[in-house]
């Protein structure tokens, strides 16, 4: 089974915004699982940990997780997320394919 990293915005100016971002990533992760892939959703891994460590700790850990994945699937609305843009750049440097949404993932990879 291919391991797919879910990338999309996490941070927001409000707690309700963070919650919505986590939920959108979770929803995509569930769809990825339903398609026969393994989904790694960092949003769920550190949900509401904000302030426990500097942001760099989470971002560095996410890059380590990403380096072990077969592909990245982007959550709709990712374009304004600096964290997601960094994940995309990292994935490309490592030769990990990046797919803009579930349809692109399904068209581009076999589970």
Image: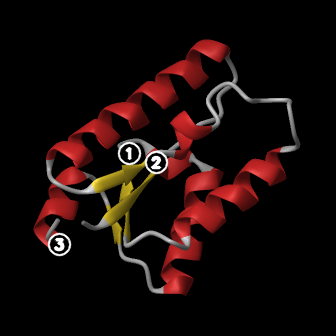
In the image, what residue occupies the spot 55% across and 73% down?
67
Residue 34: x and y in percent read 16, 43
Q: Which residue is mark 3?
A: 108
Q: Tag 2's secondary structure?
A: helix
- Can you tell which quarter of the image residue 106 is in? bottom left
- Can you tell which quarter of the image residue 24 is in? top left
Compute the Cα span from label 2 to label 1. 6 Å
Q: From the viewer's perspective, is the residue at label 2 or at label 3 nearer?
A: 3
* In this picture, residue 1 sits left or right of residue 90: left
* In this picture, residue 44 sits left or right of residue 29: right
Taking depth in this image into account, of 2 and 108 the one nearest to the observer is 2
Q: Tag 1's secondary structure?
A: loop
Compute the Cα span from label 2 to label 3. 19 Å
Badge 2: few (under 14), some or many (20 or more) residues near its Cα, within 10 Å? some
In the image, what residue occupies the spot 52% across and 34% down?
44
Badge 3: few (under 14), some or many (20 or more) residues near its Cα, within 10 Å? few
Q: Which residue is mark 1?
A: 75
Residue 25: x and y in percent read 41, 37
Number of labels in the image equals: 3
Q: Give the number of the disc on residue 78.
A: 2
Taking depth in this image into account, of 15 and 46 the one nearest to the observer is 46
| Pointers 3 and 1 in contact (C-beta within 8 Å) | no
Compute the Cα span from label 3 to label 1. 16 Å
Q: Tag 3's secondary structure?
A: helix
Badge 1: few (under 14), some or many (20 or more) residues near its Cα, within 10 Å? many
Farthest residue in the top direction? Answer: 16
């Amino acid at each position: 089974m291919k391991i797919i990293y879910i990338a999309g915005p996490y941070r927001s100016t409000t707690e309700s915004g963070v919650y919505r971002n986590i939920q959108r990533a979770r929803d995509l992760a569930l769809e990825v699982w339903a398609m026969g892939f393994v989904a790694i959703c960092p949003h769920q891994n550190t949900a509401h940990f904000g302030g426990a460590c500097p942001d760099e700790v989470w971002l560095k850990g996410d890059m380590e997780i990403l380096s072990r994945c077969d592909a990245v699937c982007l959550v709709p609305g990712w374009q304004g997320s600096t964290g997601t843009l960094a994940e995309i750049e990292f994935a490309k440097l490592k030769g990990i394919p990046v797919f803009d949404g579930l349809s692109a993932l399904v068209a581009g990879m076999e589970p």
